[in-house]
Structure formats: C-alpha cells, structure tokens
Image (cartoon, helix red, strand yellow):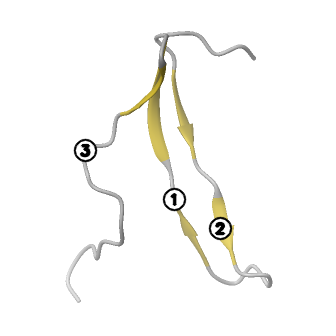
Amino acid sequence: MTLAAGMTLVVQPNVVTPDQRAGVQVGELVLVTDAGADRLHALPRGLFVAGAV
C-alpha cells in the first residue's frame, strides 16, 4: 500500500504482558499530508480513568 496525502490511518500497537493476560491499547489517528502526518486526536497523551471509580 502506498500512502497518499488525504488518507487517514490508525496506528495502534497492542502492548501486552509476556503471558498475554494483561495489556493496554494505545493508538493514534493520523492524517497523511504532503509534509508527513498530522495527529487528529484532541486529548493529550497519557493515562485517563473513565467512569466512576
């Protein structure tokens, strides 16, 4: 596949423990441009807690 300006893609590695019992999904939606890639997510990178604790 050849990437071209205007295309979007998700880069999403699946980081897991060696026994594959725990992991975390990290990913980034990017827009391919003539100059490289632009990040489309608005939230800063980091850990977030969702829902009631």
Residue located at (64% from left, 55% from top): 13
- Indicate left or right for 51 with 36 as reference: left
- Label 2: few (<14), some or many (≥20) within 10 Å? few
**As drawn, is 46 to the left or to the right of 37?**
left
User: Does label 2 or label 3 sit earlier along the sequence?
Assistant: 2
Which residue is outermost to the left? 52
Identity, as a three-letter code, of the amino acid under mark 2 = Val
Mark 1 vs 3, N-terminal side:
1
Taking the spot 49% from the left edge, 10% from the top edge, the residue there is 34
Q: Secondary structure at mark 2?
A: strand
Name the mark on residue 42.
3
The picture places residue 4, in percent across and down from the top left corner, at: 58, 10
- Give the labeled residue for mark 2: 15
Please tell me which residue lies in front, 36 or 4. Answer: 36
Tell me the tag on residue 26: 1
For residue 35, above or below residue 9? above
**Label located before the other in sequence (1 or 2):** 2
Q: Disc 1 marks which amino acid?
A: Val
Percent across and percent down for residue 24 are: 55, 70
x, y (%) of residue 26?
A: 51, 59
- Secondary structure beneath dot 1 equals loop
Single out the residue that lies furthest toward the front. 35
Residue 28 appears left or right of 1: left
Amino acid type at mark 3 = Ala
